[in-house]
Image (cartoon, helix red, strand yellow):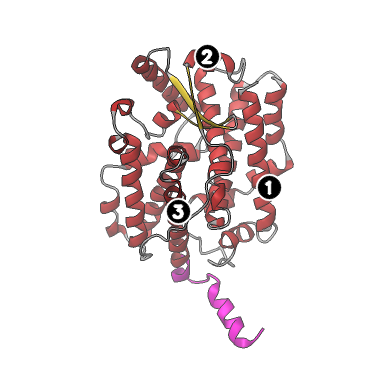
């Protein structure tokens, strides 16, 4: 390597505080480009509602975590992108964090789902108080999950799309992430055309809460526990299937999203089984347990530092060898002191999400 090229390579590696701030801004810019490209490509297609519901918690994460970083580097720029939306942002992030948040308990999540169930039954009657979006039998969204994410309002059933809660929330949060990107000096998002998911187009399944309870996750937990399991399944399937078209155009952003979803799903399922799964359970349930006990799950759950760096912005000064040009910015190697490689961890995450997707579908439909 010539002296000139060696010098250029050294400059590309993050070493100074200024370079770390720039890398954080690049990561946020890439994330905004990731979700805007996916949403824009789905507009006017049968995938548009599903993509919107699936992406909203991720938009909330980008906005929430990006604001935390902006507070550290430019506190005076906060007000214009936060006024009046703190509660909605925090609520939508539930799907991303699942039960990995030390500020909420299993009981608090279950209580919220119970409250949502009562509200839906009162509004829709017990004849049509539950609906799912499915692709090839895999759950992608549900009416209760949309309420849990603050993405829907029960009055939306009488509203036009442009007047609906999900439309307005998505528009407002989306605009604020763009404002946030500009606050970091990154200009406007780069929108790339991506293909639609290759799995079957989503199908709306209308049912009732009583029927869902009787036929899903047989003999396991309460209806609220089943809502929680369904939330895990929807999160897994969004990361694995709905977001898959961005694997080539936004590989680093997709990797970080999938790593976070995988770790939180494993954490949530572990807590659910510890709390409610005393018996051995069905063969389908055992398939889920087998994923939790796999070598891949153990490796991924032990990478707590990588989870934090995938979830949050703000590169620690102790982290070296990062670069915008590296896969996932070099975070895998940096957080494991070189013991793991990006391609290996990416393969583990895809394997885990695939196994969880298959096992959760089989368990719910058993």
Tell me the quarter of the image containing the N terminus. bottom right
Q: Secondary structure at mark 1?
A: helix
Whether residue 101 is visible here, answered yes or no, is no
Q: Secondary structure at mark 3?
A: helix
Residue sitting at x 40%, y 54%: 66
| In-image side of 110 versus 359 (left or right) | left
Residue 9 lies in magenta, yes or no? yes
Q: Secondary structure at mark 2?
A: helix
- Say which residue label 3 marks: 37
Given this view, does label 2 or label 1 mark the residue nearer the observer?
2
Residue sitting at x 55%, y 27%: 229
Q: Is residue 337 above or below residue 233?
A: below
| In-image side of 282 versus 64 (left or right) | right
Given this view, does label 1 or label 3 mark the residue nearer the observer?
3
Closer-to-camera residue (129/198): 198
- Say which residue label 1 marks: 348
Crowding near pointer 2: few (<14 within 10 Å), some, many (20+)?
few
Image coordinates of residue 265 in percent, x first then y, are 58, 37
Instruction: Determine which of the numbered discs, if any, sits on residue 211 in the image.
Output: 2
Where on the picture, by quarter, is residue 332?
Answer: bottom right
Image coordinates of residue 171 in percent, x first then y, are 33, 45
Image coordinates of residue 348 in percent, x first then y, are 68, 47
Image coordinates of residue 271 in percent, x first then y, are 59, 30
Residues at badges 1 and 3 in contact (C-beta under 8 Å)?
A: no
Q: Give the magenta range.
A: 1-20
Q: CA distance from mark 1 to mark 3?
A: 26 Å
Is tag 2's residue or tag 3's residue first in the polypeptide sequence? 3
């Amino acid at each position: 390597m010539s002296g000139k090229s060696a010098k250029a390579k050294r400059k590309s590696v993050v070493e100074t505080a200024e370079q770390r701030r720039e890398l954080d801004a690049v990561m946020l810019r890439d994330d905004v480009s990731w979700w805007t490209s996916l949403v824009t490509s789905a507009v006017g297609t049968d995938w548009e509602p599903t993509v919107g519901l699936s992406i909203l918690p991720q938009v909330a994460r980008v906005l929430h975590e990006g604001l935390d970083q902006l507070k550290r580097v430019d506190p005076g720029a906060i007000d214009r992108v936060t006024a009046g939306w703190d509660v909605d942002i925090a609520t939508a992030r539930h799907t991303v964090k699942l039960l990995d948040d030390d500020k909420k308990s299993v009981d608090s999540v279950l209580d919220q789902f119970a409250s949502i169930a009562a509200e839906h039954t009162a509004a829709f009657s017990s004849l049509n108080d539950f609906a799912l979006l499915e692709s090839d039998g895999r759950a992608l969204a549900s009416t209760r999950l949309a309420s849990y994410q603050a993405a829907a309002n029960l009055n939306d059933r009488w509203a036009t799309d442009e007047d609906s809660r999900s439309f307005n929330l998505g528009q407002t949060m989306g605009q604020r992430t763009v404002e946030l990107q500009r606050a970091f000096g990154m200009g406007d998002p780069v929108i790339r055309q991506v293909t639609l998911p290759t799995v079957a187009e989503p199908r709306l399944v209308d049912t009732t809460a009583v029927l869902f309870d009787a036929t899903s996750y047989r003999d396991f937990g309460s209806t609220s526990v089943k809502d929680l399991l369904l939330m895990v399944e929807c999160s897994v399937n969004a990361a694995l299937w709905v977001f898959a078209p961005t694997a080539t155009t936004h590989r680093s952003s997709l990797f970080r999203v999938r790593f976070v979803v995988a770790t939180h799903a494993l954490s949530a399922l572990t807590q659910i089984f510890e709390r409610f799964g005393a018996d051995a359970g069905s063969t389908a349930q055992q398939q889920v347990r087998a994923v939790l006990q796999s070598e891949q799950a153990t490796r991924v759950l032990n990478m707590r530092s990588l989870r934090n760096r995938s979830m949050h912005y703000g590169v620690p000064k102790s982290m070296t060898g990062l670069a915008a040009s590296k896969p996932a910015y070099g975070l895998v190697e940096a957080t494991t002191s070189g013991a793991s490689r990006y391609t290996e961890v990416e393969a583990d995450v895809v394997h885990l999400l695939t196994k969880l997707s298959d096992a959760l579908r089989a368990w719910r439909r058993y």
